[in-house]
Image: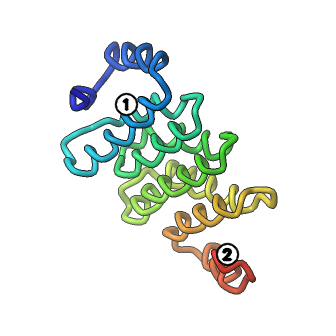
């Protein structure tokens, strides 16, 4: 019955949001994990509306799963909510998942299939997170991996600095 959540729009997503708010946390996490698996196995299924709704959940694991599940999405409507989470979510795990997911849009931008303003938003958001001294290393690393798709001298310099740093994860 979870497959019925594919392609929700308008009033359906509003009804889903009301239902979702009252669902037990464990059930939310299980549901998102399953929807993520379904979307990987069948490209015809579209749970984007569900995943976007779940980005606002109170639970950090739910938000993380939703962000991870949007990895396959190429719709530009997810860029703004993802950047907002990257900049404001209190969970480093969520921010790292978002940075990875934004890498998809960096890849798309390099093929010329993303609006220039969207590509610049993604690039600037990832670079901004990397420049924050207080940001968690894993978030900075994921942002670096994603921004590496943008081919420019400043990005090459950032990658070279990371390569020469003492941090082996970088």
| Residue 53 x, y percent position in the rendering | 45, 28
| Residue 10 x, y percent position in the rendering | 34, 17
**In the displayed structure, does residue 21 sit left or right of residue 152?**
left
Q: How many marks?
A: 2
Give the residue displayed 64% in from the left and 58% down from the top.
139
Give the residue displayed 32% in from the left and 41% down from the top.
34
Q: Earlier in the sequence, mark 2 or mark 1?
A: 1
Q: Secondary structure at mark 1?
A: helix
Give the residue displayed 65% in from the left and 83% down from the top.
163
**In the displayed structure, does residue 28 sit left or right of residue 4?**
right
Q: Which residue is mark 2?
A: 158
Quadrant, the C terminus: bottom right
Q: Quadrant of residue 157?
A: bottom right
Gap between marks 2 and 1, in whole Å? 35 Å
Quadrant, the N terminus: top left
Q: Which residue is mark 1?
A: 49
Estimate how packed mark 1 is, as few (under 14), some (14 to 19) or many (20 or more) residues with alpha carbons within 10 Å: some
Task: Pick whichever, 156 or 11, lies toward us.
Answer: 11
- Mark 2–mark 1 contact, CB under 8 Å? no
Q: Which mark is residue 104?
A: none
């Amino acid at each position: 019955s979870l497959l019925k959540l594919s392609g929700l729009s308008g009033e359906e997503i509003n009804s889903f949001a009301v239902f979702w708010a009252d669902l037990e946390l464990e059930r939310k996490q299980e549901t998102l994990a399953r929807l993520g698996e379904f979307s990987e196995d069948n490209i015809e299924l579209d749970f984007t509306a569900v995943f976007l709704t779940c980005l606002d959940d109170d639970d950090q694991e739910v938000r993380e799963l939703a962000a991870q599940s949007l990895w396959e999405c190429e719709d530009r409507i997810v860029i703004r909510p993802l950047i907002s989470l990257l900049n404001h979510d209190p969970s480093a795990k969520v921010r790292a998942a978002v940075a990875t997911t934004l890498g998809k849009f960096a890849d798309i931008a390099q093929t010329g299939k993303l609006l220039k303003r969207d590509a610049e938003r993604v690039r600037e958001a990832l670079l901004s997170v990397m420049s924050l001294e207080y940001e968690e290393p894993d978030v900075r690393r994921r942002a670096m991996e994603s921004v590496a798709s943008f081919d420019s001298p400043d990005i090459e310099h950032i990658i070279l600095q990371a390569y020469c740093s003492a941090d082996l994860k970088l």
